[in-house]
Image (cartoon, rainbow, N blue to C red):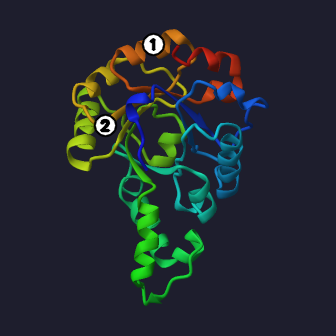
Amino acid sequence: MNVDWDAITHVTKVDPAKSLPSDLGVLEGTDLVLVGGSDGVTESNSLEAIERVTDVFSEIPVFQEPYSSSHVSRETIEAADAVSIPAVYNGDRDHFVGKHVELFTEVGQKPDELLGSSVPLVGDLIASKGVEVVAELADKLVGEGYVVQHLESTAAAVSGVETAYCPEEVAGAALATEAFYDFPIFYVEYSGTYGGPDDVEAAARYLEETALFYGGGIDSSEKASEILEAGADAVVVGDCFHDDPETFRETIPE
């Protein structure tokens, strides 16, 4: 999928396990929607959230951001514009390498179930038609280099994060994201708390092609501006989208 990352300055994080605002017109002005969460997420509520957003704003890109392969199905893949897969640098192995192998293993063994296409299987190997189908899914996958900085968050618990990175380590993860892994997104996540601009400033020095996202505690135009001025390409806003839509509107850059 082709995305104009330079045009994205505001991202809305929609948690499918939470109630959405009754008026989704509040999303007007956001540039990208990420559907995902760290607790209570299922394939069913992910699909429902994706479809509710796309029904109202078909022009806004909507990415599914699963933390488990069980959240991904043929229906979610077709409904979303992309499937964004976090690789948590300061988490455990399962959340950097393990879940990626698990996702592709499931796709490889069950392409007909996931992708709605009947293909021949030879043992555990996919015949040529199956490879083509899996390639279509791969075209929708977006890698995210990810650092979780709030140790008491559900995101940290789910990802096995026990240690926050110092700014120098954040910068190293950013450099690895662009220079080694070639992911299009590097995401600094403070999960409901405001971490300030230090990590953003450290990471921004090393990113030219990769989009730098910051999420956590953005509940005012002042905080959004501070993070963007520190070098982030986009702020990610989640909690106040669900809890206080009027405050959410204030976080959208003019």
Residue ranking furthest to the top? 222
Q: Position of residue 100 (x, y in %)?
A: 41, 60
- Identify the residue position indicated by label 2 in the image: 210
Residue placed at 52% from the left, 75% from the top? Answer: 111
Front position in the image: 202 or 14 = 14
Q: Quadrant of residue 74?
A: bottom right
Q: Position of residue 135 (x, y in %)?
A: 41, 67
Residue placed at 51% from the left, 16% from the top? Answer: 253
Residue type indicated by callout 1? Ser
**Numbered circles on residues, count:** 2
Is label 2 in a helix, a strand or a loop?
loop
**Residue 14 falls left or right of residue 143:** right
Q: Earlier in the sequence, mark 1 or mark 2?
A: 2
**Residue 94 falls left or right of residue 218:** left
Q: Position of residue 53 (x, y in %)?
A: 67, 40
Residue 28 sits above or below residue 117 on the image:
above
Residue 74 sits above or below residue 183 on the image:
below
Q: Are marks 1 and 2 in contact (CB under 8 Å)?
A: no
Residue type indicated by callout 2? Thr
Is label 1 in a helix, a strand or a loop?
helix
- Identify the residue position indicated by label 1 in the image: 225
- Mark 2 closeness class: few <14, some 14–19, many ≥20 residues within 10 Å: many
Residue 179 sits above or below residue 25 on the image:
below
Front position in the image: 36 or 77 = 77
Q: Which circle marks residue 112 in the picture?
A: none
